[in-house]
Every structure is written in C-alpha cells, then in structure tokens.
Image (cartoon, grey):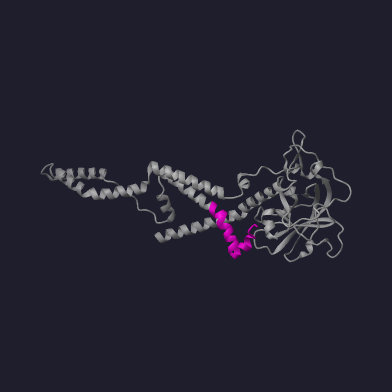
Amino acid sequence: MAAATLLAELLITFAGVCGLYLGWMEWWTGVESEHAQLAQRADSGWATTVDDGADGTVSIAEPQDGDPPVQPTSADVGELMGVVYIPRFGDGWNRNLVQGTELAQLDLAGLGHYVNTQMPGALGNVAIAGHRNGYGQPLGDIDKLQAGDAIVIRTQDYWYVYEYTSYRIVTADDTSVIVDNPEDPGAAPTKRMITLTTCEPKYSTPTHRWIAYGELKYWAKVADGIPAELADTTAGGDVVFAAASSSPNVFVSIGSMTPFFVALLVAYCVLFLLAAAIWRWPALRAVRAWKLGMNDSSGSVAATAMAGGGTGSGGASGSGGRAEGNRRRRRGRPVKPKEPGYGFYSWLLRHQPGPAPVRWLLVILLLLAASAAVMQWLCPWASSTIPFLRAMSNYTVAS
C-alpha cells in the first residue's frame, strides 16, 4: 500500500511539473518577452509618442508622395529599429523589431531583422523572423493573414505600411526567400517588399519555414498621426489608435516569479505561526493524548472492576456494573487517532497546525510557492541543460 501511494504521488508530481513546463513555455516566456520589449521601448528616445495611445484622440497621417526615406540606415545587433503592427492578429497586437535573428534577440526582443537584408522603406526586401510558438509567439497566427492585410512598421519618425500578398512553405535551408528579390533571385530588386519568416509546423519539430510576403503600399510621418489601417472611430466620431498597447498586467509589469515566490513563502510563514500559536498541531496532540491514555488505562480498569464487584452478589448486578464501568471508561479514554497516510502529501498536510481548512490553505500556499520556483528557476535550467528540451524550446540564456 505504501509503495503504491508513493508511486501514485510521484506520477502526479511528474505530471504537475510537465504541466508547469508547458505553462512556462507557452505563457511565461511570453510574459518575460513582453516585459523586456516594454523596457526596451521605455529606454529608447522615441517610445513615448502617439503610438502609446497616451494622447487619446489622434489624427490620420496622410500618405506621402515620392520615395520613402529609409530609417534606420544602420543598426547594431539587438538595437531597437521599430515596432511592427499587424491588425489581423488583434487590435492591440504589436512587437518590437530589433536587429538580428539569433535566439538572443528572438526570445525576448520580439521580431528580428535579418542583418543582410534591406531596412524599412528601402528598395528590396525587409526580411523579418519571429517565433511561431512560445516567447509570445509573435508570428503564431501567420497562417491567418489574408490578401490585402496591413503589415505596418513604425520607426522613430516614419510609418511604413505594407500590404500582405502571398505565402510559401519552404525547407529550412532555403535562403532564397530573403534575398533582395525573392520573386526572381539573382535579379535586381524592383519592389519594396517585406518578408516574414517563421517555423512550420507550429507545434512540433520545425522542418520547414512559413514565408509571408508583402509590398509597400505607402509611407507617412509619425508627426502627422497614425495610418488609417491602425485607426478606429469612437461613437462620438473621435479617431483613436486601435493598436495602442493596453496597460500591462501585473505579471508583465513585474516580469519575474521571484516576488510571487517570496510573497507566498511570507504568507505561509505568517499563517503557520498564527495557527501554531492558536491551535498547535491537532494530529500530534491526539497522538500524545492517546499515549497518555494508554498509560492510565490499567488503573481505570481496576477501579471499574471494584465498582462493579460491590453492587451486589447477583450476576446481573455485577454485569450491569461492568457495563457502566465500560461506558465510563470509553467516555474518559482518548480515542486512538486514525492511521497516518504513507504519502508525502498526506505527511505534509498532517504536519500543518490548525483545523483542516487552515492546514489545506497552508499546503496550497506551499504548492503555489513551489510552482513559482519551478517556473522561475527549474524550467529555464532544464531548457538550457537537457538537450531535447533545449531543441524543443529554442531557449537561450539572455545576455
């Protein structure tokens, strides 16, 4: 029985850790990525402008004539180049665009620009890469794009509005899709194009790449407002920035499980001490009381027997006295506690102070703290150490 209980708890614990790993991969890496992107925008000199939606109503920026200016003209690896907006992915969808497509950039920075391709607005091909799964899955919905959908890049001073045209699925080693003229590799570019690249398939080992193409529709100045593709109109007729970032939730604002882990441990310790001071440990008290009752039981039996023997000479009266003595003895003697469970969780519950609801709350606080620790430290360690997890998660240690 003990072995079966321990095996069952081990399997349940393993399943829980696997579930936490999936939660870390699919949710928490996205939280960390969004936190890092917001921090990078805040550190830039042009982040607090109209695209933050802080000014309420906005104007529609008029498309400009002539060839678009190229911005930036150059960028260091990891440097913020712009912000990408794709309304098809949701009104509030936006991701940073940084220079470089290594995991160090893609895991936390959002979208990465292939360093050997053109800059936004230039004649040729602006090639961009992004994760399709995990780390906020910036291109997770790339298969939902429809012809004519807007792909907008905002740099420090300009908007570049591209229009989605088509897609391809190619092998992972096909680099022709990001050359200057992907429609005719080797020929000089004739269009201002954008290329989005991501993994295919989405939820298994990526053997191919999903390639989405677009062409520049127009460019505009940030100082003039926002593109019509990113605007919405309120009931009162005011123009608002539909793609403005909403206020980050508490997880994104903090970006780490450490404060939650510490808060849960502090809450556990405070409640534990209060419960111990008020109720002590009921299970241990019962065991102690039962042992004391066993030591006093011989005297109780002798006293009861004497009382029963003195009630008369008849067997009936003696029998009635013994019955009464037995009842008194049962009322006065502590009840033997139930046999303890063999599992770790039952042991953990049994050693918490207070009544059952308090003990359950204490155990839940401990389990939540352990879950926070697993997601903050164990999951990244496993992804950077265990080969098949590293390959599956695309994890890299942030510099």
In-front residue for pair 146/286: 286
Which residue is rendered at x = 40% and y = 46% of the image?
353
Quadrant assignment for the C terminus: bottom right
Quarter-wise, where is residue 107 in the image? bottom right
Is 55 or 213 nearer to us in this picture? Answer: 55
Q: Quadrant of residue 239?
A: top right
Residue 181: x %, y % from top left: 83, 61
Does 193 appear in magenta? no
Q: Is residue 389 within the magenta segment?
A: yes
State the image coordinates of residue 191 (x, y, percent, origin top left). Answer: 85, 56
Look at the picture and state if 259 lies above or below 210.
above
**For this view, does 314 lie left or right of residue 204?**
left
Q: Tag count in the figure?
A: 0
Classify residue 99 by image quadrant.
bottom right
Q: For this view, does 346 lie left or right of residue 326? A: right
Percent x, y of residue 134 = 64, 55
Which residue occupies 49% across, 51% down?
Answer: 367
Main SS, magenta residues: helix
Residue 361 appearing in the image: no
Determine whether, in the image, residue 350 is placed left or right of residue 112: left
Picture quarter with the N terminus: bottom left
The residue positioned farthest toward the right in the image shown: 66
Question: Is any atom of residue 6 visible in this view?
Answer: yes
- Residue 321, percent from left and from top: 17, 43
Question: In this view, which residue lies farthest toward the top?
Answer: 236
- Residue sitting nearer the eye, 230 or 315: 230
What range of the chain is rendered magenta? Answer: 372-399
Q: Residue at x 77, y 35 (%)?
A: 238
Looking at this rendering, what residue extends furthest in the bottom direction? Answer: 173
Q: Nearer the viewer, residue 308 or 137?
A: 137
For the point 75% across and 33% down, the residue is: 236
